Image: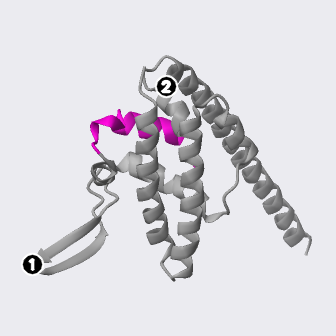
Amino acid sequence: MPDVVHEAVHDLVRTREAFQEKIDAIEDAAQRLRRLDEQLRAIVLTWSMAPLVEAYQAMRGASFLVAVIFAAEVGDVRRFDNPPPLMAFLGLVPGERSTGDTVRRSSLTLAGNRRARRALVEAAWTYRYPARVSEALRVRLEGLPKAVRDIAWKAQIRLCARYRRLNAAGKKPPVVVAAIAREMAAFLWAIGQEVAPS
């Protein structure tokens, strides 16, 4: 019996050591992530797209990283005459198979920019909660033009309600989120009409 207890204690010690190593690895990764975030923030300050990055963050879900990815991957949204070409560029439009008078819609084309699409889809999940201005969002809104703040609030009201409606209609969560991401792109396009790169 003592051998069994001894082995159990030894296994427990090894498990605790392995657990502590995992905790240390997570903390090291978190510190590295903080350093990279600080470096990226310093670089963005001198970037011509910095005004757009700041304005995009007025949108709920558009954190600093989402705004940087969107600005870097899409560039100046004014090159798109209206939102639908931007949505197609992002691959957020449904595919279509047409013959004669018959039109069949399929899943998203996913033919566009994968990084920007993924950032918007991740940001779209925040609209499952009721519309409100959190403390973090309030800080991001400070100093932005009224037109940008108004667009962002209109987007939040519409997208939160749309999320609830689509969800209540029984749509699957990925379908709902893709629809929200598509509309989010349109609101980001509208913000890009108000703020130009420097």
**Does the magenta run of residues contain 9?**
no
* Secondary-structure class at tag 1: strand
Name the residue rendered at 41%, 51% in the picture. Answer: 186
Name the residue rendered at 46%, 30% in the picture. Answer: 195
| Magenta-tinted stretch | 61-81
Let me know if residue 190 appears in the view: yes
The residue pinned by badge 2 equals 50
Are dots 1 and 2 in contact, CB under 8 Å? no
Seen from the viewer's position, the closer of residues 166 and 158 is 158
Q: Amino acid at mark 2?
A: Ala
Q: Quadrant of the C terminus?
A: top left
In the shown orientation, is residue 123 left or right of residue 25? left
Kindly identify which numbered label has been placed on residue 99.
Answer: 1
| Residue 132 lies in quadrant | bottom right
User: Horizontal and vertical percent for residue 104?
Assistant: 22, 78
Query: Which is more N-terminal, label 2 or label 1?
Result: 2
Q: Is residue 139 above or below residue 42?
A: below
